[in-house]
Amino acid sequence: MRQISGFIVIDFIGGMSDKNHDKLLLEMENGVRAERITTQVAGFSKTGLMQLTRRKKEASLLEVTSETCPSCNGRGHVNSSLTLAYELERELRTHDLSSLNFILIITTESVLSAFLDLGVLDEAPIDWEIAEEAIPFYQIARVE
């Protein structure tokens, strides 16, 4: 059970007596005391299944062999084109647009379309470069 953690159910096949259940429970409790991982023996259920909980202290195999997705940061979702258009607007508003001569933004066509539909910052000196990417994104590449 070295790397197993969470809620664990063990089915000891066979019709054990209550006395043997108690012996097995005592042995299990003695055995988990030597473990580095915090383990609690909850006992037997009404159907005869032993229940344990173990708190993980080390990284799981998935955590060791993979890394967080840079697009969704491990959420399984990416921001929509409209969300990115609003983020781009907020980021552009942090600049003093009246003093700028040139802004180069690299983005996907869907984000550009959503941004233009907002109808904001029409006076900003923005040059657009379209990237052929499946995932919507934008990047402010240059500000002069």
Image (tube, rainbow, N blue to C red):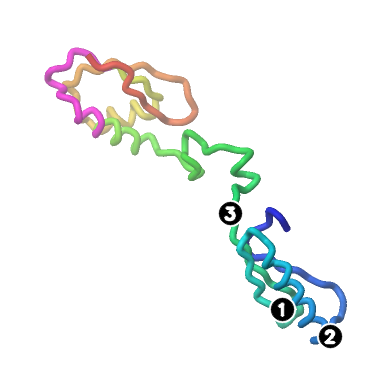
- Circle 2 crowding by C-alpha within 10 Å: few under 14, some 14–19, many from 20: few
The residue at which mark 2 appears reads as 17
Which residue is painted at 67% across and 69% down in the image? 52
The residue at which mark 1 appears reads as 44
Which badge, 2 or 1, comes first in the chain's sequence? Answer: 2
Magenta stretch bounds: 90-103
Which badge, 3 or 1, comes first in the chain's sequence? Answer: 1
Residue 131 sits inside the magenta stretch: no
User: Height in image: 94 above or below 22?
Assistant: above
Q: Nearest the camera: 44 or 85?
A: 44
- Circle 3 crowding by C-alpha within 10 Å: few under 14, some 14–19, many from 20: few
The spot of residue 122 in percent (x, y) is 19, 24
User: Height in image: 50 above or below 107?
Assistant: below
Q: Nearest the camera: 8 or 98?
A: 8
Residue 102 sits inside the magenta stretch: yes
- The CA span between labels 3 and 1 is 25 Å
- Which image quarter: residue 45? bottom right
Q: Nearest the camera: 64 or 23?
A: 23
Which badge, 2 or 3, comes first in the chain's sequence? Answer: 2
- Circle 1 crowding by C-alpha within 10 Å: few under 14, some 14–19, many from 20: some
- Mark 1: amino acid: Phe
The residue at which mark 3 appears reads as 57
Q: How many discs mark residues in the rendered view?
A: 3
Please state if 88 lies on the left or on the right of 101 as rendered: right
Please state if 95 lies on the left or on the right of 77 as rendered: left
Contact flag, marks 2 and 3 (Cβ < 8 Å): no
Dot 3: what SS?
Answer: loop
